[in-house]
Image (tube, rainbow, N blue to C red):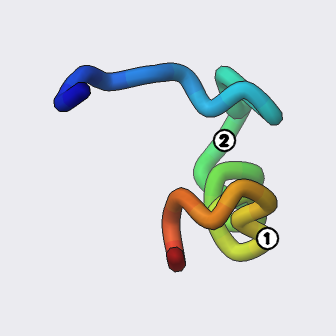
Amino acid sequence: DLNWHPYDPQREVSNLAVFLELVDHDDYGCFWG
């Protein structure tokens, strides 16, 4: 729908390292397909 949506497993992160770990795991396939 071309809108931004929160990533439900974790809507906010406390620092960049946590964000990069979240992207690396990519439970929903949002970041790596």
Is residue 26 shown left or right of residue 4? Answer: right
Quadrant in which residue 6 is drawn: top right
Helix, strand or loop at disc 1?
helix
Q: Mark 2 and mark 1 in contact (Cβ < 8 Å)?
A: no
**Mark 1 neighbour density, 10 Å: few (under 14) some (14–19) many (20 or more):** few
Is residue 30 shown left or right of residue 14? Answer: left
Is residue 18 shown left or right of residue 5? Answer: right
Q: Amino acid at mark 2?
A: Asn
Is residue 23 shown left or right of residue 14? Answer: left
Looking at the image, the residue that sits furthest to the front is 1
For the N terminus, which image quadrant?
top left
Helix, strand or loop at disc 2?
loop
Number of residue marks: 2
Q: Amino acid at mark 1?
A: His
Image coordinates of residue 17 in percent, x first then y, are 70, 59
Q: Earlier in the sequence, mark 1 or mark 2?
A: 2
Image coordinates of residue 27 in percent, x first then y, are 80, 60
Residue at (62%, 32%) from the top-left corner?
Answer: 7
Image coordinates of residue 29 in percent, x first then y, are 63, 65
Q: Which residue is mark 1?
A: 25
The circle on residue 15 is 2
The circle on residue 12 is none
Q: Nearer the viewer, residue 8 or 19?
A: 8
Quadrant in which residue 12 is drawn: top right
**Mark 2 neighbour density, 10 Å: few (under 14) some (14–19) many (20 or more):** few
Q: Is residue 10 above or below residue 27?
A: above
